[in-house]
């Protein structure tokens, strides 16, 4: 079965760093675009960072220069390095895998991990 297992969330002070990990199984990881979304209380879920199957990346304007997404296809794992964290980064962060192909599109989600930025 498909699994996306996240880890690395927690409490950090403003200006600090965290690295989120998402370990994938049950599908051909290297074929999928991998994304990190986040959702804060009272707000819509937003796309934070994306990485294609070939390693191209894109970021939300709010995190550009602070966050970095990467993937290790040999480990079936995607990462989100978060630096210079701000209180407004506080949210539940979700790992997402997408395969948009004719006839058989796929879209998988992790369980979410809480990131809290507070002094």
Image (tube, helix red, strand yellow):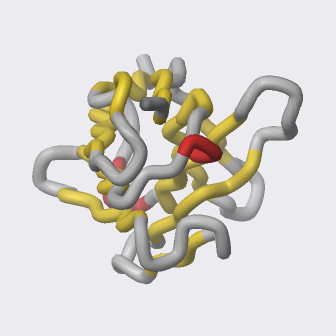
Query: Is residue 78 something one can see in this rendering?
Result: no
Which residue appears at 51% of the width and 50% of the height? 86
Quadrant of the drawing holding the C terminus: top left
Q: Residue furthest front?
A: 119
Check the picture and name the quadrant holding the N terminus.
top left
User: In the depicted view, which residue is nearer to us: 10 or 27?
Assistant: 10
Q: Nearer the viewer, residue 81 or 112?
A: 81
Splitting the image into 4 quarters, where does residue 53 fall? bottom left
Question: Is 70 situated left or right of 85 in this image?
Answer: left
- Measured as percent of width and height from the top left, residue 17 is found at 28, 48
Q: Is residue 73 above or below residue 104?
A: below
User: Residue visible at 36% across and 79% down?
Assistant: 54
Residue 30 in picture, x, y percent from top left: 32, 59
- Residue 49 % position (x, y): 54, 62
Instruction: Give the percent coordinates (x, y) of residue 55.
Output: 35, 77
Judge whether residue 9 can be spotted in this image.
yes
55, above or below 67, in the image: below
What residue appears at the point 50 percent right and 61 percent down from the top-left corner?
A: 33
Image quadrant where residue 11 sits: top left
Question: Please, is residue 73 above or below residue 12 in the view?
Answer: below
């Amino acid at each position: 079965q498909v699994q996306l297992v996240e880890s690395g969330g927690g409490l950090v002070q403003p200006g600090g760093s965290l690295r989120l990990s998402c370990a994938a199984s049950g599908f051909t990881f290297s074929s999928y675009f991998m994304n990190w979304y986040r959702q804060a209380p009272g707000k819509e879920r937003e796309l934070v960072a994306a990485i294609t199957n070939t390693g191209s990346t894109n970021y939300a304007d709010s995190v550009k220069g602070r966050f970095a997404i990467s993937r290790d296809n040999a480990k079936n794992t995607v990462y989100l390095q978060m630096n210079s964290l701000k209180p407004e980064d506080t949210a539940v962060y979700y790992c997402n895998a997408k395969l948009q192909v004719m006839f058989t599109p796929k879209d998988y989600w992790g369980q979410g991990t809480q990131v809290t930025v507070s002094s």
